[in-house]
Amino acid sequence: MNVKERIDQYAPHAVELRRALHRNPELSLHEIQTTDLIRRELESYGISIVDSGLETGLIAEIHGTKPGSGKTAAVRADIDALPVQEETGLDFCSQIPGVSHACGHDLHTAALLLAARVLKEMESEFSGTVRLLFQPAEETGRGAHMMIEHGAMANPLPDVVLGIHTWPDTPAGMIGVRPGASHASSDTITIKVKGKGGHGAHPYRCVDPIIVSAYLLTQLQSIVSRELPMVEGGVLTFGLIRGGTAANVIPGEVELQGTLRTLNAKWREEMIASIQRIAKSCCEAMRAQAEVTIKEGMPVLYNTPEIIEGIRSSANTVLGPDCVQELPAASPGSDDFSCYLALTPGALFRMGTGNEDPATHVGLHNGGNRFDERGIATGGAVIAQYLLDFLQG
């Protein structure tokens, strides 16, 4: 049997696995039952689990038995859920109050298990190694770093790494691709505006950090509108302002926290420098001081164009013609899959989960999203076909 025939045979079981995961979602770094389910499935397929030392998540390998070059190809599925109350009304909805698979990681996991089962059965048809990365804690941005620290990208460094993600705007049965910059970088900005507190009736005796912060926030927005080229794209949003204890007391300090998103590593550095410059000068001009902290997050997710082309070709083989949607724009969202791509070529593609039901289009991280489960077979098929093509090449 070829890849498609095997996918069709095992897809119903993969859907059952997805529903089991969906009923029992687990938050980042608490994916204990999820990991146990994955381990049991892989062992039932005869797939070797790597002793990585991970507490949640796991690494496994399939070794091709056909003589050849011995390349290594890795593929990641994230496995964690979100602190979001499910509102789908599905008969297999989350049984954990306030926790659900609102980003579709249960579908990612099921798709990779499906692909792994197929590739294990076809191990005589390729040489080299398929490395399966079932990653915890993508939603917190910590998981990829943990996987890398536990050997996911070593001994040897994979020649290619593949990732998948559900996408409500792509119809079920299709995949979405975008070469080059696909997802934005993400950094957390913290600015402490330090003034001089005092009585609200005597502001002239104080340095009011609330007023300074108001001016600073408006000036910082000029970075995107006046310092960043329009074609580059960037977002600077401050979602937290903390300061003050009473209506008639001027506080001594205000804290601002925000997120910076860019699609270009050079302009990421430029924007960070601009934030530091404007914060310092604005605060000094108003007799205050600024303390700026940049918590570096995920880099830009850059899909290697040649690998995207290979994914297109494999998708046409296993899904048929007109199955690939060219995504028109990069996402301002971030994904720590970019950490793997910083080490080796690779790509993340979207597995379509939309259909005519409006509930499949409400968006990721929404408790009402009803993902079309046909995306599991689509994602699993493209993973298996691409890795087979790559390791046979």
Image (cartoon, rainbow, N blue to C red):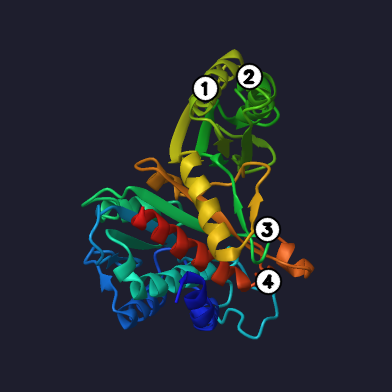
Inspect the image, locate mark 3, and give the three-letter code of the amino acid beneath it. Answer: Thr
Question: Closer to the camera, 9 or 230?
Answer: 9
Q: Position of residue 104 (x, y in %)?
A: 57, 66
Q: Which residue is mark 4?
A: 370
Question: Closer to the camera, 231 or 45?
Answer: 45
Q: Label 1 to label 4, Cα distance in Å?
A: 40 Å
Looking at the rendered structure, the secondary structure element under dot 4 is loop
**Front label number (4 vs 2):** 4
Q: Position of residue 282 (x, y in %)?
A: 60, 18
Quarter of the rendering containing residue 244? top right
Decide: few, some or many residues near mark 2? Use Cα within 10 Å; few <14, some 14-19, many ≥20: few
Name the residue located 62 percent from the left edge and 28 percent from the top edge: 232
* Residue contact at pointers 4 and 2, CB within 8 angstroms: no
Inspect the image, locate mark 4, and give the three-letter code of the amino acid beneath it. Answer: Arg
Name the residue located 38 percent from the left edge and 47 percent from the top edge: 340
Mark on residue 170?
Answer: 3
* Residue contact at pointers 1 and 4, CB within 8 angstroms: no
Q: Label 1 to label 3, Cα distance in Å?
A: 34 Å
In the drawing, does residue 370 fall left or right of residue 191? right
* Residue contact at pointers 2 and 1, CB within 8 angstroms: yes
Check the image and report above or below for 155 versus 344: below
Inspect the image, locate mark 2, and give the three-letter code of the amino acid beneath it. Answer: Glu
The mark that comes first in sequence, 3 or 2, is 3
Most distant residue in the bottom direction: 91
Looking at the rendered structure, the secondary structure element under dot 2 is helix
